[in-house]
Image (spheres, grey):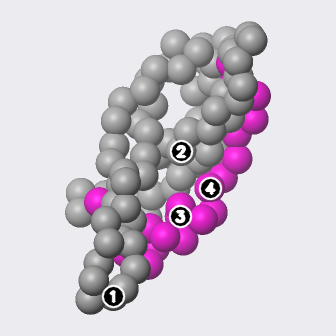
Amino acid sequence: MIKLIEVYEKSAEYNAQLQRNKRSFGLRDVFINPSYVVCIRENESLKATSERSPLLPELSQDLDYTQVMLMSPGQATRNINVIGDLESIAGACEVVK
């Protein structure tokens, strides 16, 4: 198992002044089984969002984000977004396997 930090989107709040929903994010620790990793890719959309405005006050705008696709036997795939660049996440998965 490897420990990663997941970036997840909380339920949106409506901003009456802007007349649109405001996105908000949270962080949580996740442990994943590297043998269930099907695919990893850079999350350019989350990176661009972060560069426009920090996702959370404590996060640097320079961070990289990676989307990890997981699939366990008999289950549908699930995507999670984690903090870290593509190479470091791939490396972490390879070290444990």
SS state under label 2: strand
Q: Nearer the viewer, mark 3 or mark 1?
A: 1
Of the residues under marks 3 and 2, which one precedes in the sequence? 3
The quarter of the picture where residue 70 lies is top right
Residues at marks 1 and 4, CA–CA distance in whole angstroms: 27 Å
Residues at marks 4 and 3, CA–CA distance in whole angstroms: 6 Å
The residue lying toward the viewer, choosing from 28 and 97, is: 28
The reply to whether discs 4 and 2 touch (Cβ–Cβ < 8 Å) is yes
- Please determine whether, in this image, residue 2 is positioned above or below residue 83: above
Q: Which residue is mark 1?
A: 18
* Residue at x 59%, y 47% (from the top left corner): 66
Q: Which residue is mark 4?
A: 43
Q: Which residue is mark 3?
A: 47
The reply to whether discs 2 and 1 touch (Cβ–Cβ < 8 Å) is no
| Disc 4 residue type (three-letter) | Asn
SS state under label 1: loop
Image position of 23 (left or right of 65): left
Residues at marks 4 and 2, CA–CA distance in whole angstroms: 8 Å
- Please determine whether, in this image, residue 81 is positioned above or below residue 61: above
Image position of 56 (left or right of 92): left
Tag of residue 96 = none
Is residue 88 visible in the rendered image? The answer is: no
- Please determine whether, in this image, residue 59 is positioned above or below residue 18: above
- Please determine whether, in this image, residue 64 is positioned above or below residue 83: below
Q: Verify whether residue 97 appears in magenta.
A: no
* Residue at x 72%, y 25% (from the top left corner): 76
Magenta range is 36-56
Tag of residue 81 = 2
Q: Verify whether residue 47 appears in magenta.
A: yes
